Image (tube, rainbow, N blue to C red):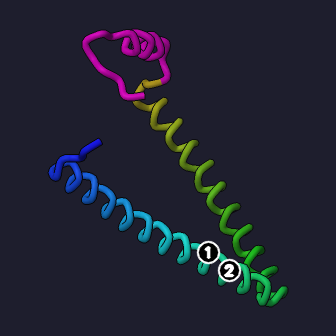
Amino acid sequence: MFVRRRKYSDLYIRYQLALKATAKARKESSAFRNAAATSARQVAEADPVEVARLREQVGVLIAERNAERKRADGLQARLDDALGLNTSAMAEGAKWQSRREDKRWSR
């Protein structure tokens, strides 16, 4: 079977692009493996006291975030009450809005 020069040239270009993509993927994979190995080594060499201190700090930060989130939820509820957004009419309107055919919803 004969292959036309144009088809051969197209195939060769695709082959070269595939080779470059493979080389790039191998390079990125190697970099990822090196980073993972470095991270694993750093964790293994970490001072247990420092790790415990950092975990405690993370726990404090998570507790602060949760408290702030709870406060913001309360403020949002108070604002909704003040603006009348918690009425039964608003709830019925929400049902109607979800069935509108002239409006597209991105869900």
**Spatial separation of the CA atoms under disc 1 and disc 2:** 6 Å
Left/right placement of residue 60 relative to residue 98 reads: right
Q: Secondary structure at mark 2?
A: helix
Left/right placement of residue 86 relative to residue 61 reads: left
Quadrant in which the C terminus appears:
top left
Q: Are marks 1 and 2 in contact (CB under 8 Å)?
A: yes
- The magenta stretch is 86-107
Left/right placement of residue 18 relative to residue 71 reads: left
Q: Decide: few, some or many residues near mark 2? Use Cα within 10 Å; few <14, some 14-19, many ≥20.
A: few
Residue receiving disc 1: 33
Q: x, y percentage for residue 84?
A: 43, 24
Q: Decide: few, some or many residues near mark 1? Use Cα within 10 Å; few <14, some 14-19, many ≥20.
A: few
Q: x, y percentage for residue 49?
A: 83, 87
Residue at image position (48%, 30%) is: 81
Q: x, y percentage for residue 105?
A: 35, 23
- Compared to residue 61, the image places residue 67 above or below, namely above
Residue receiving disc 2: 37
Residue at image position (53%, 77%) is: 31
Q: Secondary structure at mark 1?
A: helix
Tell me which corner region of the image, top left, top right, bottom left or bottom right, holds residue 41. Answer: bottom right
Identify residue type, mark 2: Ala
Quadrant in which the N terminus appears:
top left
